[in-house]
């Protein structure tokens, strides 16, 4: 019981750490995206949400603002304006931008969606969405960085992975809750008792 309680707390803390990594837009990678160069899953996701108009603009800006606020204080000790938020991320004319860049990186795009959604859902209930999204993003980065698909000839927009990606990967794995008792049993289902049919009552003998 003690081990189960410790693992439950570890999973909860990992979910929170992953949430702040995503929400505060801690740089995990550098990759070319529809808005220019993106360094976090929220930036990749926001450009798609605005261009497709899936969510209202204030919802997307609410996702972007915490990270913009922290980055503004760290970089130049300024608080970004809500109205100027799209200019900061080069999202004002995102609807006119070509979607080919994102279509060539579907793994990173889909993984970013799962990362953002998993970080939000993980605060309520731990699941595997964050882990799946992180692995999908890593595969997309490996595919472009090592296999060279798609081909990128501009060094300024070449794919790059920050060490914080390892932290995000560890948090995503630790945020998954495991049934330690089931693991100890080797995943075998408990044996069910066999119910024997009742024997028919013996007929009374006639005298």
Image (tube, helix red, strand yellow):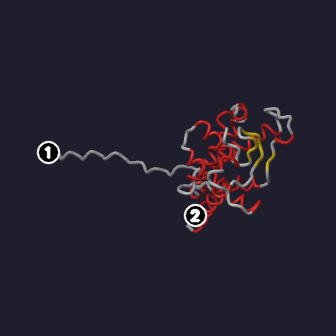
Mark 2 highlights which residue?
4
Q: What's the mark number on residue 54?
A: none
The image quadrant where one finds the N terminus is bottom right
Q: In this view, does 140 lie above or below 180?
A: above
* Residue beneath the point at 61% across and 53% down: 119
SS at badge 1: loop
Q: Earlier in the sequence, mark 2 or mark 1?
A: 2
- Number of dots carrying numbers: 2
Q: Position of residue 171 (x, y in %)?
A: 68, 56
Q: Where is residue 15 in the image (x, y as percent from the top left)?
A: 62, 58
* Residue beneath the point at 61% across and 57% down: 184
Q: Where is residue 181 in the image (x, y as percent from the top left)?
A: 57, 58
Q: Position of residue 201 (x, y in %)?
A: 24, 47
Mark 1 highlights which residue?
206
Q: Are marks 2 and 1 in contact (CB under 8 Å)?
A: no
Could you give the CA–CA distance between mark 2 and mark 1, rounded to whole angstroms? Answer: 64 Å
Q: Going by the image, does 193 lie left or right of 61?
A: left
Neighbour class for label 2 at 10 Å: few (<14), some, many (≥20)? some
Q: Is residue 105 above or below residue 4?
A: above
* Residue beneath the point at 58% across and 64% down: 4
Report which quarter residue 197 is drawn in. Answer: top left
């Amino acid at each position: 019981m003690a081990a189960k309680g410790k693992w439950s707390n570890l999973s909860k803390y990992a979910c929170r750490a992953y949430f702040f990594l995503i929400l505060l837009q801690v740089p995990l990678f550098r990759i070319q995206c529809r808005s220019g160069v993106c360094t976090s899953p929220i930036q990749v996701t926001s450009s798609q949400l605005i261009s497709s108009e899936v969510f209202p603009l204030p919802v997307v800006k609410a996702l972007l603002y915490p990270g913009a606020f922290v980055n503004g204080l760290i970089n130049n000790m300024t608080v970004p304006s809500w109205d100027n938020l799209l200019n900061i991320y080069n999202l004002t004319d995102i609807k006119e931008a070509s979607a080919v860049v994102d279509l060539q990186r579907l793994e990173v795009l889909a993984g970013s969606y799962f990362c953002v959604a998993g970080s939000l859902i993980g605060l309520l209930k731990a699941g595997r969405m964050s882990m799946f999204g992180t692995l999908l993003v890593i595969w997309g980065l490996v595919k472009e960085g090592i296999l060279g698909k798609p081909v990128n000839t501009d060094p300024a927009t070449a794919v790059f992975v920050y060490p914080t990606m390892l932290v995000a990967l560890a948090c995503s794995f630790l945020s998954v809750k495991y049934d330690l008792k089931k693991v100890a049993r080797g995943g075998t289902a408990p044996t069910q008792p066999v119910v024997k049919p009742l024997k028919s009552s013996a007929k009374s003998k006639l005298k």
